[in-house]
Amino acid sequence: MMNPIKKYSVLVLVAVALIVVFQNAGAVTVRFLLWDFSMSKALLLPVVLGLGLLIGWLISGWRR
């Protein structure tokens, strides 16, 4: 069974994530070099975070 503190922490984080998604549902145009596309801001945030984590992981592995 999950600790009550962890359970409430997960519920709060899910609620905050849902608020962010609903407040940032509008589309935004992204221009990068020769590419030009539109996507939701709520989708753009995790995509950019994931790309940043991937690039950081690749660079740290390359340095070793």
Image (spheres, rainbow, N blue to C red):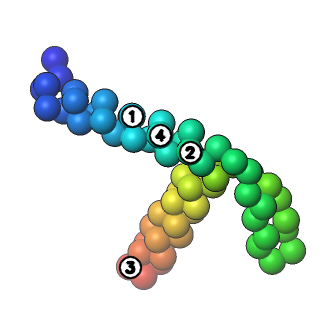
Q: Quadrant location of residue 22?
A: top right
Q: Is residue 14 left or right of residue 5?
A: right
Q: Earlier in the sequence, mark 2 or mark 1?
A: 1
**Amino acid type assigned to the residue bearing label 1 in the image:** Ala
**Amino acid type assigned to the residue bearing label 4 in the image:** Ile
Relative depth, front residue between 48 and 28: 28
Q: Are marks 1 and 4 in contact (CB under 8 Å)?
A: yes
Q: Earlier in the sequence, mark 1 or mark 3?
A: 1
Q: CA distance from mark 4 to mark 3?
A: 40 Å
Residue under pointer 2: 23
Residue under pointer 3: 64
Q: CA distance from mark 2 to mark 1?
A: 12 Å
Foreground mark, 1 or 3, reads 1
Q: CA distance from mark 1 to mark 4?
A: 6 Å
Task: In the displayed orientation, state which residue is furthest to the bottom.
Answer: 63
Label drawn at residue 15: 1
Label drawn at residue 50: none
Q: Is residue 54 visible?
A: no
Q: CA distance from mark 4 to mark 2?
A: 6 Å
Question: Residue 10 location in percent, x, y?
Answer: 29, 33
Q: Are marks 4 and 2 in contact (CB under 8 Å)?
A: yes
Task: In the displayed orientation, state which residue is furthest to the top.
Answer: 1
Q: Is residue 61 left or right of residue 32?
A: left
**Amino acid type assigned to the residue bearing label 2 in the image:** Gln
Residue under pointer 4: 19
Q: Secondary structure at mark 4?
A: helix
Q: Tell me if residue 50 comes above or below residue 52 in the rendering.
A: above
Q: Is residue 32 left or right of residue 48?
A: right
